[in-house]
Image: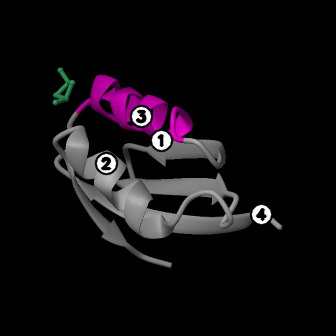
Amino acid sequence: STQICRILIKGMTCTTCSSTVESALRSVNGVLRSQVALATEEAEVHYDPRVVTPSQLLETIDDTGFEAILIS
Ligand code: 9UX
């Protein structure tokens, strides 16, 4: 069944930054939905744990140039 993780993202300063991260997360296999909020510096990601792990989600964000810290 679907799981939800929340990730703190450091370094985003404009909506293009948050859109970049959101698109990167949505392109990952196993991600069902993803919302990135610039104001709170948080991503909420709905994912299939049989396909993708939170660690891979953090790596995806790191690859866009922003620092990612797992919240829950
Ligand atoms: Mo906005 Mo983010 O111009 O690296 S895209 S600051």
Q: Secondary structure at mark 4?
A: loop
Which numbered disc, 4 or 1, marks the residue that appears first in the sequence?
4
- Whichever of labels 4 and 3 marks the residue nearer the N terminus, that label is 4
Query: Looking at the rendering, in which quadrant would you find the N terminus?
Result: bottom right
**Tag 1 near tag 2, CB within 8 Å:** yes
> Which picture quadrant has residue 35?
top right
**In this view, 13 is above or below 16:** below
Q: Which residue is depicted at the point 35% across and 28% down?
A: 20
- Reading the image, the residue beneath label 1 is 25
The CA distance from mark 3 to mark 2 is 7 Å
Determine if residue 71 is in view: yes
Q: Earlier in the sequence, mark 2 or mark 4?
A: 4
- Of label 1 and label 2, which has the lower sequence position? 1
Whether residues under marks 1 and 3 lie with C-beta atoms below 8 angstroms apart, the answer is: yes
Give whichever of 22, 55 is nearer the camera: 55
Amino acid type of the residue tagged 4 in the rendering: Thr
Is disc 3 placed on a helix, strand or loop? helix
